[in-house]
Image (cartoon, rainbow, N blue to C red):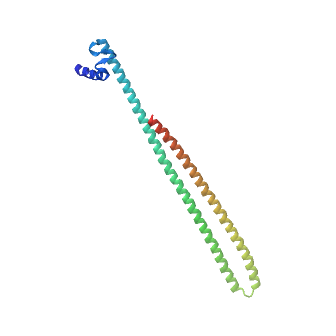
Amino acid sequence: MPPKKKAGKSGKGGKAGGGIIDGVSMTEMSREQLEAFALRIRDELEREREERNFFQLERDRLYTFWEITRQQLEENKAELCNKDRAIEEAAEKHDMEIKIYKQKVKHLMYDHHSHLAELKANNMVTLKMAENDYCEQELELEKDKKALKAQLVEMGLTHEEEIKALRLEHSSELSELRNKFSAEAEVLEGKMDA
């Protein structure tokens, strides 16, 4: 066992300059000097182990932080996908509501014309009264039609504003998330490089 130790030391000494330690040849060193040298080597080894353990812990901590950040990024991507879907659903709902209102207007017009035709056929004797009734109903229908059109326009504007606001909010959140993760990635890269 001692010869192996000596061979190891002479190998290190060879690198330092042919078995010379602190300016003294190993063969000329006293036992106390060799013990002091061995103690110093042991201390250096212990310090190297502590540093290695510290760097391993630091590496593990950085890896854990990276994993958490990656998971948060995935969660935020999923949330953004959900918001995109919500915007699409709001647009689809808006289109469906407009379609329903248009059908209501069409049915109102059809019902109105059917009713007028029936009145004219059945009330030839009271033509004047039917004409007056027709005029009143026509005005009422125009009012209803205008009201429905105004309602459609108002709804269209409201839905457009809502969709625009949702898209702006989505764009702003996406930009903030990109900036946040870009900054975190730079910090992480800086730590990894250091």
Residue 149 sits above or below residue 19 on the image: below
Could you tell me residue 18's position as x and y percent? 28, 20
188 vs 107, left or right, is left
* Corner quadrant of residue 135: bottom right
Compared with 118, 21 (above or below) is: above
Quarter the N terminus occupies: top left
**Quarter-wise, where is residue 12 in the image?**
top left
User: Which sits in the foreground, 53 or 110?
Assistant: 53
**In the image shown, does 130 or 87 lie closer to the viewer?**
87
In the image, residue 193 sits, relative to residue 82, either above or below, namely above
Query: Residue shown at 61%/54% (left/top)?
Result: 165
Q: Position of residue 189 (x, y in %)?
A: 46, 39
> Is 80 situated left or right of 112 in this image?
left
Q: Residue at x 49, y 50 (%)?
A: 77
Residues 158 and 135: in front is 158
Q: Residue 172: image x %, image y %?
A: 58, 49
Rendered residue at 38%/30% (across/down): 52
Residue under the point 68% across and 71% down: 145
Residue 182 or residue 104, whichever sits in front: 182
The quadrant of the picture occupied by the C terminus is top left
Tell me where residue 157 sits by quadrant.
Answer: bottom right
Outermost residue, bottom direction? 125
In the image, residue 48 above or below residue 63: above
